[in-house]
Image (cartoon, grey):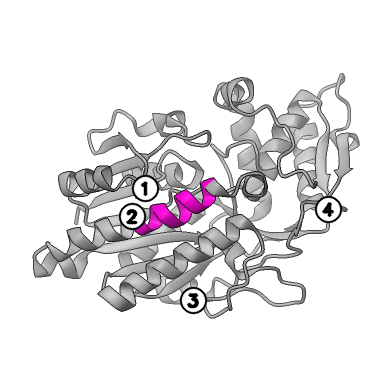
Amino acid sequence: MSKRFLITGGAGFIGSAVVRHLIGATDHRVCVVDKLTYAGNLASLAPIADNPHYTFARADIADAAKMKEIFFGFRPDVVMHLAAESHVDRSIDGPADFIQTNIIGTYVLLETALAYWRGLPKTAQRDFRFHHISTDEVFGSLDAPGAFCETTAYAPRSPYSASKAASDHLVRSWHHTYGLPVLVTNCSNNYGPYHFPEKLIPLTIINGLEGKTLPVYGNGSNVRDWLYVEDHACALTAVVEGGKIGETYCIGGRSECSNIDVVRAVCALLDELAPSAAIGRREDLITFVADRPGHDLRYAIDPARICTELGWQPHETFATGLRKTVLWYLANRAWWQRIRDNVYAGERLGVPA
């Protein structure tokens, strides 16, 4: 059955993957709401931009009047809330934007969604969903064996993760207090095509292609659980379609890897797929730099619940997903070169004082 999806942050990395998945694999109608800050990029939606089932609204989720206009004009069956400031280093440099978007913006969306939902017919109220997409960083740092799951206590340790933790709590409270039918997902580190090049994998790919240094924080021992973004888009769709109202689902790729091993794997792929006599061996470009303040040691997610209850499984291993990612950046230089030239040149953010 065709539904109407309102997707906030739909021009961002994960949001655009969700939009491309929905438009390409279903007959759902999608309205993207995005402020188009530095990381919002309409070029990431170019593959579906001419599809008649897709519409776009440039708007700030913290603008209550605009959100009301969009909700009551588009009349969504599902809201997938991905709009967020998302880079830890930027939250260290400027936490105010994270408070405004991730907390205030989520509050405005919840209030708008609640007013809209209350006015729906009973059958439409029953089918409506507000899906809040969050991060494993709200759980803090894993310093011992084990993995995060749906019952893990919150322990955010950066301005970014604290703002996302606050938004998670707001969403759940609007369900328990007001009855709004919500779903919450917490995911591990995403990677893949259309990833803004401030994050580790795309920055390493682009710097490696240009023969620039490959910065690694501290000694590179920090561990992340990697999830291919298109696998994540499929998981989010599965949660919307089959998730239990009021519940949380943790989504991970079961692909733990230290930062230094990630960088070395990218180097090996670049040397294989884009060898350069002038640059030489990419691993020689690795440079260890001062660590990020409060850098969490390890993240890992146990996705057993979503796998068991909803039948989702990641299709990509880290090896296959990373190869696809490097090949995409090699084939889509125009996409990232515009960012490199005009938006973000690869400079260090969140520098320790």
Proximity of marks 4 and 3: CB atoms separated by less than 8 Å: no
- Cα–Cα span, label 2 and label 1: 6 Å
In the image, farthest residue toward the right: 284
Q: Which mark is residue 23?
A: none
Does residue 190 appear in this view?
yes
Question: What amino acid is at disc 2?
Answer: Val
The three-letter amino acid code for the residue at tag 1 is Ala
Query: Disc 1 or 4, which lies upstream in sequence?
Result: 1
Write down the residue under mark 3. Answer: 305
Badge 4 or badge 3: first in the primary sequence: 4
Q: In the visual, does 337 lie left or right of 51?
A: right
- Give the Cα separation between the discs numbered 4 and 2: 39 Å
* Residue where numbered disc 4 is placed: 220
Q: Give the mark nearest the N terminus, 2 or 3.
A: 2
> Magenta segment: does it hold 197?
no
Q: Secondary structure at mark 4?
A: loop
Residue 317 appears at what percent x and percent y? Answer: 63, 56
Q: Residue 62, labelled with which disc? A: 1
Residue stretch rendered in magenta on the structure: 97-107
Give the image location of residue 300, x and y in percent: 66, 67
